[in-house]
Image (tube, rainbow, N blue to C red):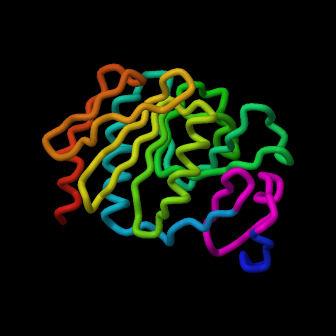
Amino acid sequence: MQLSDLDVTKTYTYADYLKWAFDERIELIKGKIFKMSPAPGSIHQRLSQRISLKLGIYLIGKRCEVFTAPFDVRLSRKTSNDKEVNTVVQPDICVICDINKVDDRGCLGAPDIVVEILSPGNNKKELQNKYEVYEENGVLEYWIIHPSEKTFLRYSLVGNSYQASRLLTTGDEVTTPVLPGFVLNLDELFAVTNN
């Protein structure tokens, strides 16, 4: 079966997703298929590696864990039934502090932090849909990194709604109440984009 064989007007579930073996990587957002960007470029990979390494070192001996794509995050507040879960995303990086959410297929439920590093293939609709599902499902922080602009934007869940941070860039440091004491220096992070 090819991705082009699917009816894009139909709504799909995680049970459907498990049956597919496409060459392209996809995500399901509210039952709709979104084709992911092709394999990320070297700058994207360097940024992802640097952030996940920094998070991983910080998390040694702590209750949270860091996971990197490809890693399925199944988002549903109502059910764990594969036939009813209709959102499956693969964030570039996620931090999960409730390890009971982690199983052999990825994560069932909201990670505490989701990190998305923008690629040229990302589109506004995809970003808006992810923002909505992360907010609706209780992801505490959603970080968006724009490599070519060298910017970092964090959405923090306050009540049931996201509040945006100011736009951070070189010269700034990222801290988070989710991980007290964690510091991400953006000069160091974005230095990898100069190679």
Q: Residue at x 62, y 35 (%)?
A: 136
Task: Indicate whether residue 85 is drawn in magenta.
Answer: no
Residue 43 vertical placement versus 114 (above, below): below
In the rendered structure, the answer to whether residue 27 lies left or right of residue 123 reads right
Give the quarter of the image for residue 181. top left
Residue 122 vertical placement versus 190 (above, below): below
Of the 4 image quadrants, the one containing the C terminus is: bottom left
Q: How many numbered marks appear? A: 0
Q: Residue 110, how many percent across, how many down?
A: 61, 34
Q: Residue 186, how many percent across, how many down?
A: 21, 43
**Residue placed most toward the observer, 46 or 162:** 162
Q: Residue at x 46, y 33 (%)?
A: 141
**Residue placed most toward the observer, 23 or 110:** 110
In the rendered structure, the answer to whether residue 166 lies left or right of residue 136 reads left
Q: Residue 50, how many percent across, how many down?
A: 31, 48
Of the 4 image quadrants, the one containing the N terminus is: bottom right
Q: Residue 84, how many percent across, how many down?
A: 83, 44
Q: Residue at x 21, y 39 (%)?
A: 185
Which region of the structure is painted magenta? 9-32
Q: Most extreme residue toward the left, as rendered? A: 171
**Residue placed most toward the observer, 188 or 76:** 76
Residue 92 vertical placement versus 79 (above, below): below
Task: Indicate whether residue 31 is drawn in magenta.
Answer: yes
Q: Residue at x 28, y 37 (%)?
A: 166
In the rendered structure, the answer to whether residue 191 lies left or right of residue 22 reads left
